[in-house]
Image (cartoon, coloured by chain):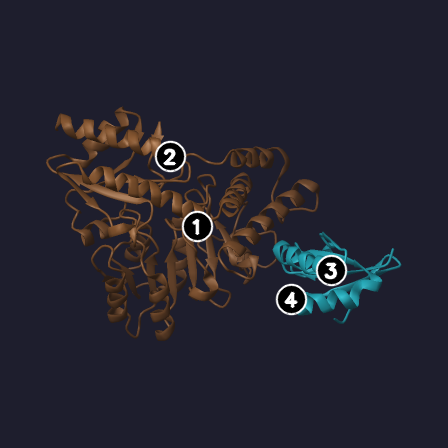
């Protein structure tokens, strides 16, 4: 199978990830639950993972790194810590349901800073207009999961700081691919999966927390600390990590993070952009296709959407799957993004890349698409 | 053998203390202190040799790490001491 669905989950992982997970299963119990060697090994691995994530994302203190089940879990903690029921939030026009559904569940008043694709200045202007007194939080995806649009989080962060409104960054598509520095961004929280650009296993996620922003747990339970007290501890990461940690997942995530740091975020980005550019050049020559690409990929990373005249996107996805090529068709859990881009009625076919894809695979995708579109639907 | 134990609020905090002390060249190790040393239950601590307490405290202070409590272990008994 040729895999082009890394915006959902990176499927190919470094060999070190599986090895680390196996090692964890064979040798680790749970951190903070005892002083015996298996618990100590688990504690060392969890601490090492927190420390390396803190270094990668510009945090001074590894306690500000909280392990979660996935980015959705992390976003729920962040949003529900800052937005009270019936509160007010401003989001971009390219948000995922992981942001908008928690807000809906809170009955929040949602203002959408909608702006055309690949025009970051318009995004900043829209946020600038909508962030008014009484806004509880601003939430913005760093990169659109549908279109790969890189949104101007530094500028939005600056607007938030000037208005004193907390900022939540959804780094689901950018962690491990674009630089992200929490210190300079001043964001209250950044949420990310472990299983996409960080190459960890599914079932891992991370919430980066600013030290002075109060965070409320979604779950209460054992933390291995202050066990007599019946309230959750008031310090991180324990406050947000009730129950046993996913140690095989965290060990795998650490191996994935080390892979990213060893190769370098810049190198991974350059590789993915090269493949995206190659796909764009090939697809541009095919009649009847509508491509969503930023000129020169200036404001886009390795996620590319398309539609084809007269063809249902799901049929294209299925036809490619029959040819051994995995892409994602439909709405991508992001109706806000499709509404903003005008593709809510049709959805799109999404092609997304990872460090493990090759130019040969892109060439095969282009040939397969030509065949699929040539036969008609 | 006599030693000091420095109580931490959590395993992660104890690990930060260990890292800080390691940078300062103070050898220590993390362990779970006796139950009666904490009224909160389930704690972690770092153990340092008696002569190294001043440099240990200086290093922790430098890195902004606050011990919950400090105890001297002597003749089989723990006695709380001021930081």
Residue A144's disc is none
Q: Which residue is mark 2?
A: A358
Determine the image quadrant of residue A12: top left
Is circle 3 on the same chain as circle 1?
A: no
Q: From the image, which quarter does the N terminus of chain A lie in?
A: top left
Residue at the limit of the structure toward the right, as seen here = B75
Tell me where residue A145 appears, x and y as whole percent: 31, 47
Apparent side of residue A282 relative to residue A51 in the rendered image (left or right): left
- Residues at marks 2 and 1, CA–CA distance in whole angstroms: 17 Å
Crowd rating for badge 1 (residues with CA inside 10 Å; few <14, some 14–19, many 20+): some
Q: Which residue is mark 3?
A: B37
Q: Residue at x 79, y 65 (%)?
A: B53
- Circle 2 marks a residue in which chain? A
Q: Residue at x 29, y 35 (%)?
A: A327
Residue at the limit of the structure toward the left, as seen here = A310
Q: Which residue is mark 4?
A: B63
Tell me where residue A272 appears, x and y as whole percent: 37, 43
Mark 2 or 3, closer to the camera: 2
Tell me where residue A181 appears, x and y as whole percent: 46, 60
Which color has been applied to chain A in this rendered view?
Answer: brown
Is circle 1 on the same chain as circle 4?
A: no
Say what secondary structure mark 4 lies in.
loop
Q: Which residue is mark 1?
A: A266
Quick one: A222 or A336, which is closer to the camera?
A336
């Amino acid at each position: 199978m040729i895999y082009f669905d890394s915006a959902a989950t990176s499927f190919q992982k470094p060999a070190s990830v599986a090895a680390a997970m196996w090692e964890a299963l064979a040798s680790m119990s749970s951190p903070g639950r005892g002083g015996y060697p298996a618990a100590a090994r688990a504690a060392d691995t969890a601490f090492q993972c927190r420390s390396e994530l803190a270094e990668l994302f510009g945090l001074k203190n590894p306690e500000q790194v909280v392990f979660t089940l996935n980015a959705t879990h992390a976003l729920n903690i962040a949003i529900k810590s800052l937005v009270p029921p019936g509160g007010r939030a401003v989001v971009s026009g390219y948000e995922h349901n992981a942001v908008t559904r928690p807000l809906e569940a809170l009955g929040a008043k949602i203002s959408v800073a909608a702006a055309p694709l690949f025009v970051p200045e318009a995004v900043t202007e829209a946020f600038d207009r909508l962030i008014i007194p009484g806004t509880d939080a601003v939430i913005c995806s760093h990169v659109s999961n549908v279109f790969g649009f890189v949104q101007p989080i530094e500028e939005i962060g600056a607007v938030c700081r000037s208005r004193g409104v907390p900022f939540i960054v959804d780094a689901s598509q950018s962690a491990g691919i674009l630089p992200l520095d929490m210190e300079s961004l001043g964001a209250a929280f950044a949420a990310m999966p472990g299983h996409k650009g960080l190459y960890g296993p599914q079932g891992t996620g991370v919430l980066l927390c600013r030290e002075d922003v109060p965070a409320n747990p979604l779950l209460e339970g054992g933390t291995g600390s202050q066990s007599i007290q019946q309230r959750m501890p008031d310090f991180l990461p324990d406050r947000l990590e009730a129950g046993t940690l996913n140690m095989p997942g965290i060990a795998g995530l650490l191996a994935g993070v080390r892979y990213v740091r060893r190769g370098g975020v810049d190198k991974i980005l350059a590789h993915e952009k090269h493949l995206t550019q190659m796909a764009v050049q090939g697809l541009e020559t095919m009649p009847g296709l509508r491509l969503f690409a930023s000129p020169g990929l200036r404001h886009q990373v390795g996620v590319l959407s398309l539609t084809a005249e007269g063809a249902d996107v799901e049929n294209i996805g299925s036809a490619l799957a029959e040819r051994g090529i995995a892409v994602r068709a439909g709405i991508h859990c992001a109706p806000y993004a499709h509404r903003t881009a005008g593709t809510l009625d049709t959805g799109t076919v999404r092609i997304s890349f990872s460090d493990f894809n090759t130019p040969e695979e892109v060439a095969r995708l282009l040939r397969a698409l030509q065949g699929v579109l040539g036969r008609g639907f | 053998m006599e030693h000091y134990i420095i109580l931490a609020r959590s395993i992660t905090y104890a690990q930060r203390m260990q890292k800080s002390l390691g940078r300062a060249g103070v050898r220590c190790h993390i362990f779970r202190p006796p139950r009666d040393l904490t009224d909160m239950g389930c704690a972690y601590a770092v153990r340092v040799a008696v002569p190294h307490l001043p440099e240990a405290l200086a290093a922790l202070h430098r890195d902004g790490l606050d011990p919950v409590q400090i105890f001297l272990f002597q003749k089989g008994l723990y006695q709380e001491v001021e930081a």
